[in-house]
Amino acid sequence: MKHIEKLKEATLEYLNQSRTVIPLNGKRPLISGWADDNYKPTANDVERWFDEFSTTITGVGLRTGYVESMFVLDLEVEQNLADLDLPDSGVRAKSGRDGIHYYFSDIGEFSDTLTS
């Protein structure tokens, strides 16, 4: 399976998990309107993106924040999650500068930590 096919499959899986997906070229969104509160792509949108942007799509972004009930903590290589007194999220990805992105899906669990 080609990279672009795997990316499309992963994008559709995120969509099935009720995640708000955004087609990217590097870190730049390939579409407008993705930050609007009412933006909710469909499987048909994903199919269209992979046709329309077949030569420019390099990744997919996930919209985060309170509306999405997900946030991301971006730690640089010299930082350690254990130093921040937060639980291990279990979901992580390598960032562009050899740091790590930790994904959390229960913002309420950390509200006291984040506001103190």
Image (cartoon, helix red, strand yellow):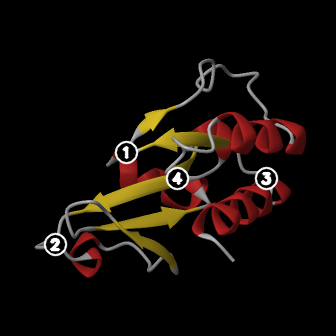
Residue matched to label 3: 15
Element type where label 3 sits in the image: helix
In the rendered image, the residue lying farthest to the left is 78
* Observer-nearest of 34 and 66: 34
Residue drawn where x is 60% and y is 41% of the image: 23
* Observer-nearest of 33 and 110: 33
Estimate the x, y position of residue 28 in percent, counting from the top left: 42, 34
Element type where label 2 sits in the image: loop
Query: Does label 3 or label 2 sit earlier along the sequence?
Result: 3
Give the crowd class for mark 2: few <14, some 14-19, many >=20 residues within 10 Å. few
Above-or-below relation of 28 to 78: above
Residue matched to label 4: 59
Residue matched to label 1: 115
Query: Does label 2 or label 1 sit earlier along the sequence?
Result: 2
Estimate the x, y position of residue 4 in percent, counting from the top left: 62, 61
Mark in front: 3 vs 2: 3
Disc 3 marks a residue whose amino acid type is Leu
Query: Does label 2 or label 4 sit earlier along the sequence?
Result: 4
Estimate the x, y position of residue 57 in percent, counting from the top left: 54, 45
| C-alpha gap between disc 4 and disc 1 | 32 Å
